[in-house]
Image (cartoon, coloured by chain):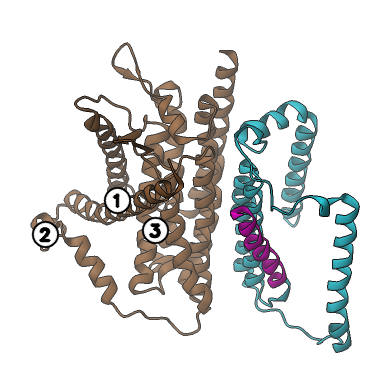
Chain colours: A brown, B cyan
Amino acid sequence: MSIGIFILVSIVKILLALFILLTAVAYTVLLERKVVAHMQNRWGPTRVGPFGIWQPLADGLKFIFKEDLTPPYVNKPLYLLAPIIAVTTALTSIAVIPIGPWIKLGSLSTPLQITDVNIGLLVILGVTSVGVYGVALAGWSSNSKYSMLGGLRASAQMISYEVALGLSLIGVLIYAGTFSLSDIVNQQTGTWLGFIPKWNIFKGQIVAFFIYIMAAYAETNRIPFDLPEAETELVAGYHTEYSSMKFAMFFMAEYANMVTVACLASVLFLGGWTGPVWGPPLAQSLIPIFWFAVRVFAFLFIYIWVRGTLPRFRYDQLMAFGWKFLLPLAIANIVVTAFVVAMK
Amino acid sequence: MLALVLFFIFAALCVGGAINLLVQKHPISSALSLIVVMGSLALLYLLLGAEFVAAVQVIIYAGAVMVLFVFVIMLLNAGAEERLSQGSRVATMLGVPALIIGFGITAALVSHIAGLDRIAIGGPKVMHGADLFGNPQAVGHLLFRNYLLPFEVTSILILVAIMGAVVLARREE
């Protein structure tokens, strides 16, 4: 493949990935409003289009036309920088996530991810760890006590749970022996006895999976760990002083992070795009994308389900849970997994 | 060629961030400059083919250590630093150029002695497949085979430092 075609293919893939991610973000918001509404015996959005399916577009337009207010006494450069950091890091981490195997179009063949780097997982961890600054700086630069408390809570929470999150992934990595996400998925193809899929979750990483889920909920500031924006006590937490598109950027970042977490869970624990495929060659390379989407959808649905079910933690409970329960459990999982792999 | 251009961009960013770190009066601005320095260092590692080190640099330094710095500055709500004395103007006029010249002479001497100026200027060597020594496997082999003892001793040292920090922090009870 010549360099020209490579760059062209890459640009097309980046645009496609951005389009898919932003659409997914918009419709996750709608899904959340609908599902939570039905759980609370309401209808949710119904006015814009059938079942309210054009609601995200209406919301987007509304955000663009809202007055963009910058409160006085904010630290202006950082106030502007914070939402940019948040949304950029949230959108960047999708670059290394594979949504399908290699695809062939005529003489052209390319992996269904923007780039397959051999430190893929580390790239995601690195990018998300930089994402904390968006929230922390938003809280600090707004010069408001609610934002400040939200920012402080967010940074403390994200640092604490990042440890458990990172350690829960080590078990999978010990099995896989690689950081490349597409290699990790390829190792999960096939079945035992014809019906139990060889997903990492069935290879003994089920504890790691639950640690990952819980830590990931905390990392994305979702209920039951939504203390940074706890609306009953902090108005809206770190984004209290933001309006219009700047607020929308934080909103997009939160949902994009949810999608990334769901993608990563599917890739690492649930076998990525593996599943039965049939039909002509083109269908065979597109059906895996469908299986991947099903997993991501299921994971997002559980996210919303949890939101509709659980109350919020108290702050000391949050810290005790992260450091005294999840962290030792994650370390125990690493020790057991390493022992099993070494004995093989 | 591209590697050379990227090297100069990130090297300039790194030095610029370091200078900004010293010039800024507000601790948050200084901390953010330090993050820029850490980030550009990571990209320089990446240009040298040390992918693992680059990723770890971002995760540990830019992502964890600096978040704690920013957190502490936010928690203490430290304001802009007040400079009481303006310093001697003569020192500024003479000192800065003298420093630059001194640094230049030292750099020239060191590179001459080390023979660096005889290496063809083509920027950092672009790495390919086989000579990647910075990928996770290679680093892992080095750490856990060749340098196992120093590695473990270092981790015990860090553990002792953490314990010490906890003991010192709880002293007032």
Indicate the position of residue A173 as horizontal and vertical percent values: 53, 30
The amino acid type, in three-letter code, at marker 1 is: Ile
Count of numbered labels shown in the rendering? 3
Per the rendering, the mark at residue A45 is none
CA gap, disc 3 to disc 2? Answer: 25 Å
Q: What main secondary structure does the magenta stretch of the protein show?
A: helix
Residue A186 appears in the picture as rendered: yes
Residue at 30%, 54% (x, y): give it: A19
Q: Which residue is mark 2?
A: A46
First in residue order: circle 3 vs circle 1: 1
The residue carrying mark 1 is: A20
Asked whether the beta carbons under mark 3 and mark 2 sit within 8 Å of each other, the answer is no
Q: Is residue A39 above or below residue A334?
A: below
Mark in front: 1 vs 2:
1
Disc 3 residue type (three-letter): Ala
The residue stretch that appears in magenta? B1-21
* Pointer 2 chain: A
- Tell me the residue that label 3 is attached to: A253
Image position of A326 with respect to A12: above or below: above
For residue A330, side relative to residue A115 (left or right): right
* Residue A239 location (% of width, % of height): 41, 68
**Quadrant of the rendering where the C terminus of chain B is positioned:** bottom right
Residue depicted at 50% across the width and 83% down the height: A73
Q: CA distance from mark 3 to mark 1?
A: 15 Å
